[in-house]
Image (cartoon, rainbow, N blue to C red):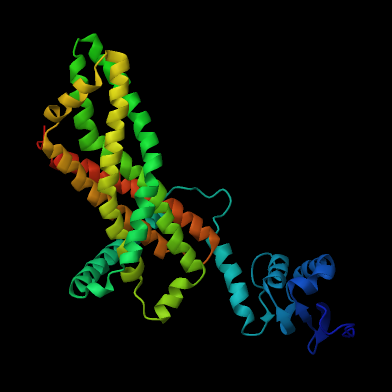
Amino acid sequence: MVEPAIDASSPQLHRTSEDGGVTVARLSGEWTLLSLRPHFEALQAQARALAGERSIVWDLRDIARLDRAGAMLLWTAWGHRRPQRLRWQPEHEDLFTQFGAATSLARAPGAPSFGLVALGHRVLSFGDHLADALRLAGQLLFDLALMLRRPDLIAWREISANIYRTGAQAMGITALVGFLVGITLSYLTSRQLKNYGADIFVIDILGISVWRELGPLLAAILVAGRSGSSMTAQLGVMRVTQELDALSVMGVSHTLRLVMPKVIALAMTLPLVVVWTSGIVLLGGMVAARAQLGIEYVQFLHGLPSAVPVANLWLGLSKAMLFGALIALVACHFGLRVKPNSESLGAGTTDSVVTSITVVIIVDALFAVLFSDVGI
């Protein structure tokens, strides 16, 4: 017999019998966080006891309200799987489907982290990311052609704001790191050259290595970690707060309004940051060379133009422009792929920084091979 409920809104769980000897666990009332607070432990113990009966039927159709707290209580009592005999309302399926998907994605304890299946998933994931990035790049080319025909579509304010954030605000950290790297590089190089009496060649080594390789690479890595992560987080937060969906409803293109200004701004800013960073690195190297080898500042500055061909400067600036566009593209790609939850936002930001730095190093290696005879 069904016991009368004391309060219609209070969560109730009763064990009843139907015709044919069918045992039914009937739920009623409001299974919400506030309603469950005074009855949580009792209902949890009762639900676990009933879940041990394999032939029991769970009837959720009389529940007035059910939120994630109530659904999680039942899901835990059921052993993280749906019972074989279940009656519920259609709107309840979405709640339990989320729990079922999370459980199926979780890796079984003790399962190997590596293997053919895991490798296959990584390859498919890489292919998916690559295809999406290529589609985004293609869409940017179409948007660029559209902007050339209709200059009124160019988001000048957004480009200006991104130039300030990625350029002016990055000068402090790039100067600090560049100066310390310059001192370290010059100090170690000077000690080796001093053993062979080739002190003056420290100018050639520092000049070519900084303008050609170290300056663009160092600036790109710092900007990828600082500005690239910021771009990914910005787009990810817009996904979480449904701002991107609102823009889609209003007919505003994500790539034209959000991605393109970031790509243009960083492609313009990074060459300037490279010039600034390379200059600071050389300043640190000049200070260390003066302290270690006794090379005067005027002698260092006079010998630098003749030691470094102009081709190295243009090569470094062209690499920096490409690095800037790639960093912004990768950052926006991961930002647009963020799902509306905080965990995806953190993972997307981390993957964005790692991928950006990896892409920069790979492209720099390709430049080093293709232009090995330029400026040397």
Q: Nearer the viewer, residue 363 or 192?
A: 192
Does residue 176 appear in the picture of this structure?
A: yes
Q: Is residue 123 visible?
A: no
Q: Residue furthest front?
A: 298
Quarter holding the C terminus? top left
Q: Position of residue 42 (x, y in %)?
A: 84, 67
Q: Is residue 301 above or below residue 102?
A: above
Q: Quadrant of residue 317?
A: top left
Q: Which quadrant: the N terminus? A: bottom right
- Residue found at x 43% / y 63%: 235
What residue is shown at x 22% (from left), y 67% (from top)?
Answer: 141
Residue at 26 percent across and 54 percent down: it is: 267
The image quadrant of residue 43 is: bottom right
Pinpoint residue 290: horizontal percent, then vertical percent: 29, 18
Residue at left offset 67%, top offset 71% = 68
Q: Residue furthest bottom?
A: 19
Query: Measured along the vertical axis of the image, is residue 77 above or below residue 17?
Result: above
Image-based side of 161 in relation to 109, left or right: left
